[in-house]
Amino acid sequence: MNGWQSTRTRRVTLAAMLSVATVLIAPQVGHADNGQDLAKAPPEQVGMSTQRLARISAIFKRDVDQGKLPGAVMMVARKGKLVFAEAVGFQDKNAARPMSLNSIFRVYSMSKSLTSVAAMTLVEDGTIQLADPISKYLPAFKRMVVSVPKIDPALVRLTYTMVPAEREITIQDLLRHTAGLAYGELTTNTPVRDAYVKAGFVAQSGPDFDIRGMTADEQVERLSKAPLATQPGAMWEYSIAVDVLGRVLEAATGKRLSEVLDERLFKPLKMADTSFWVPKNKIDQLAQPLPVDPITGLPNILFDMSTPPKNDSGGAGIASTATDYLRFAQMLLNKGQLDGMRLLSPTTVRLMTADHLGTRIDDMVAPVTALLGTPGYTFGLGFAVRRSDGIVGEPGSSGEFLWTSFAGSFFWIDPKEQIAAVYMTQSPGPLRGHYRRLFKQLVYQAVVD
């Protein structure tokens, strides 16, 4: 073994020894800059078991050691107290850098919940209304057409007809994914996908879902010319709607979305490491995926967060830490306030976490079914919402709300059990759903009161 190999071997060995850093009520969970942690308590004080929580450590460490995950940070709060905070594995396995409780993650679609809450603060101060047509703020969306599929019996094939939208898209539609918009990477509506590809909303190379390379004005102008995939208000379809919501917030306030979120969420909640890009002095905190997915064998390619984007992607563009995001989750569990700072009224939190689909709106792919692999959820304003204690193939309670991310991260809030939990990783492959469910069931099995 030559000197370089010997040195590298020692680095990897040391990193492996550090690959699990567990904090069960440590004196202080580290956080960069001015971030602030929740108050800590022994698990038994809030009806949870230290011994049972330790199962999370053992199981996730095992899978890191088997090369299934690069690493993860997991945090659990109950009854307002932090009872579990753990970093396992590697922040960057290639660099032999252990995961840290301060690690920063691309949270992709968990950006949607942040943007949605910011939107509701504007509803509360009277700047916007849920029933407003978005053309009030973005006139280009005034008259949209819809690509309607139908079977041609003569040719026995699917064809598409363009028809006028029956009504305008509203802000509520954007929040609950009933705007008729789509993701070009996901839609099965061929004319919609073709239009999104032509407009630059589907990456021909580089990471999926990355639309940060066009300006906000370009985004609005191009997307408004594409057909809708469904009639507004008729169907739930996971989509680029929250990016458009970000453009609405910018038009309504006259400020860039990053400024809106800083003022209304990040600064009040002391989310010091949450932003639309990672500055140079923090870039070493940014977690990286395994170079190749262990299941598919395909390369893992995620956003480059080292430079400011041309537009702030409210649907997928934010980076954050587990500590920061847990503060956001706890604020929602507290019905809109944290540390004496009120961001939302309890009535607004109740509205956001209600069922906004009901039986009238179709959901061909039920919210969360594709993301967690289980039915039983509806959708509110920015979150999936559990309909009942049963049906869902995992523990939890009626009224819990949650969302997930392309890179594997996940959070949920259970008001009945008074649990807020965050799972952060950079693992975008097909094992995402497995680890979300696994973490969730391991948290609930540790509840003993």
Image: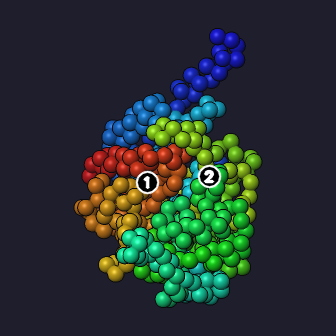
Q: Quadrant of the N terminus?
A: top right
Q: Residue at x 59, y 87 (%)?
A: 143
Image coords of residue 88 (percent x, y): 50, 37
Q: Residue at x 38, y 46 (%)?
A: 434
Element at badge 2? loop
Image coords of residue 361 (percent x, y): 37, 78
Spatial CA span between label 2 and label 1? 27 Å
**To which residue does mark 1 refer?**
421
Residue sticking out furthest to the front:
154
Is tag 2's residue or tag 1's residue first in the polypeptide sequence? 2
Image coords of residue 149 (percent x, y): 44, 75
Q: Residues within 10 Å of mark 1 (few under 14, many from 20)?
A: many
**Mark 1: which amino acid?**
Ala
Q: Residue at x 59, y 55 (%)?
A: 208
**To which residue does mark 2 refer?**
207
Q: Residue at x 26, y 52 (%)?
A: 449
Using the image, tell me which numbered label, if any, was put on residue 209. none
Q: Is residue 362 left or right of residue 116?
A: left
The structure's colour scheme is rainbow
Decide if residue 376 is in sight here.
Answer: yes
Decide if residue 235 is in sight here.
Answer: no
Q: In front: mark 2 or mark 1? A: 2
